[in-house]
Image (cartoon, helix red, strand yellow):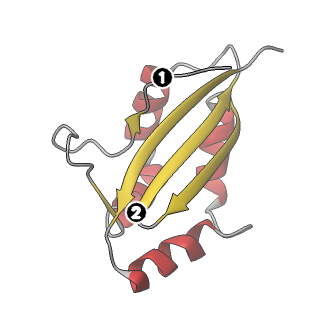
Amino acid sequence: MSTKRHCFSCDLKDDSKLIAEYKAYHAAGNAWPEITKSIKDAGIVDMEIYLIGNRMFMIMEVDDTFDPVKKAEQDANNPKVQEWENLMWNYQQELPWAKDGEKWIALERVFKL
C-alpha cells in the first residue's frame, strides 16, 4: 500500500487554559470514537498534531482511497463530526490568511531531501 503525506496548520486561541483543554480532548483515548472512526474510514492511515505556542501542525498519512472532497462531504453529513467541529471552534481560530470559515490550511512544501 502506498501512502501520501498531507500537512496542515491551524491556530489555537492564545489562552493557556483553552490550550490545556484542547490538549486534554486530544490526549490518548480521549478523542471521540466516532471521530477517529470517521478519520480512518476516509483512508487516513495515520494522523499526528504538533503544537508550538498556539500554532498547530497536522501531519496525515493517507492511502490511495483518500479523497479530501469526499471526506469534507462525509464530515458535513455526519452529525457527530459536526458536533466535534463546533466544539473545537471554541479553541481554534483562523490563521490570518485563511478564507472565511476555513480552519486547517494546507502547508506548501518548500524543501525535500
Task: Give the mark nearest the N terminus, 2 or 1.
Answer: 2
Q: Which amino acid is tagged 1?
A: Val
Residue drawn at (18%, 37%), measured in percent from left and top?
99
The 10 Å Cα crowd at callout 1, few under 14, some 14 to 19, many 20 or more, is few
Q: Determine which quarter of the picture holds residue 101.
A: top left
Q: Position of residue 60 (x, y in %)?
A: 62, 36
Q: Are dots 2 and 1 in contact, CB under 8 Å? A: no
Disc 1 element: loop
Residue drawn at (47%, 54%), measured in percent from left and top?
56
Q: Circle 1 sits on which residue? A: 110
Q: Circle 2 sits on which residue? A: 88
5 lies left or right of 81: right
Q: Residue furthest left?
A: 100
Question: Relative to residue 23, is residue 85 depicted above or below?
Answer: above
Q: Nearer the viewer, mark 2 or mark 1?
A: 1
Q: Relative to the observer, which residue lies in front, 68 or 23?
A: 23
Q: Is residue 77 visible?
A: no
Question: Relative to residue 11, is residue 75 depicted above or below?
Answer: above
Q: Determine which quarter of the picture holds residue 1.
A: top right
Q: Residue furthest right?
A: 1
